Amino acid sequence: MQRVGLWALGIGLVVTVGLLTVEQGYTEDDTPTCTLKTLKGRYLFGGIDTQLPPAVTQQSLLAVAGYHIFNGDGTGTDIVTVSINGEVVLENFVTPINYTVNANCTGTFTVPAAGESFGIFIAPTGEELIVIGTTPGSVSVQGPNRRVSPK
C-alpha cells in the first residue's frame, strides 16, 4: 500500500513539473497582424503635454481632449479642444490626420496642420491605442484611447 502511494505521488510530481517546464507552442497564425483597417472608427483621447523650447519660447503645459476618427485607409479627422497654460486656444477644432499601421501593430500618426507627429501602439483588435509624441520639443503620452464607435 505504501509503495502504491509513493508511486502515485511520484507520477503526480513528474506530471506537474513537466507541465511547468513546457513552453506554450505558437504558430505564425498566433502573431497579431494589424493593417490600416485595424484602426476604424471614433476614439476618445485626452492628455497633458509639456511643450519645451525650441518648439515654444518658454516651457508650457498643453492640455488636449477630443476624438480621433480613423477611416480605415490611412486618413481621418481629429476634433480637438486645446488649452495652453489654462487658456483655451482651440475649441472643437476639426483637422485632417494621416496614419500608418505596421503588421506588428505599431505605426505613426500625423496632424499636418499642426506639424505634429506621434508613434502609435495598437491593440490587435483595434479597440485601443496608445499615442506618444515624436515631435521635437513636445513630451506627451496619451492613452489608452478607446474606440467608442465603429464609425
Image (cartoon, rainbow, N blue to C red):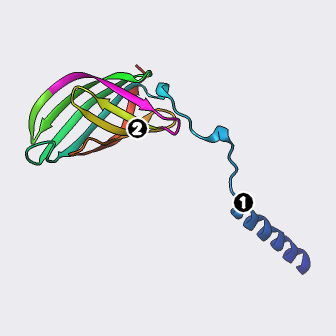
Q: Is 97 part of what is drawn in magenta?
A: yes
Q: Which is nearer the eye, 30 or 6?
A: 30
Q: Residue at horizontal 42%, vertical 30%?
A: 100
Q: Is 111 part of what is drawn in magenta?
A: no
Amino acid at dot 2 = Leu
Q: Which residue has dot 2 on it? A: 129
Question: Is the residue under label 2 in contact with that under label 1 (CB below 8 Å)?
Answer: no
Look at the image and tell me whether residue 1 can be seen. no
Q: Which is nearer the eye, 85 or 107?
A: 107
Q: Position of residue 122 (x, y in %)?
A: 44, 38
Q: Upstream in the sequence, badge 1 or badge 2?
A: 1
Q: Which label was assigned to residue 1?
A: none
Judged from the image, the secondary structure of the residue bearing numbered disc 1 is loop
- Residue 71 to residue 31: above or below: above
Q: Position of residue 11 (x, y in %)?
A: 83, 69
- Residue 42 to residue 57: above or below: above
Q: Position of residue 43 (x, y in %)?
A: 36, 29
Q: Which residue has dot 1 on it? A: 22
Please, which residue is most extreme toward the bottom here? Answer: 2
Q: Which is nearer the eye, 41 or 61?
A: 61
Q: Is residue 83 left or right of residue 129?
A: left
- Residue 107 to residue 74: above or below: below
Q: Residue at horizontal 38%, vertical 29%?
A: 99
Q: Is residue 79 left or right of residue 40?
A: left
Q: Residue at horizontal 23%, vertical 21%?
A: 94
Amino acid at dot 1 = Val
Q: Which residues are magenta?
A: 91-105
Judged from the image, the secondary structure of the residue bearing numbered disc 2 is strand
Label 1: few (<14), some or many (≥20) within 10 Å?
few
Q: Quadrant of the C terminus?
A: top left
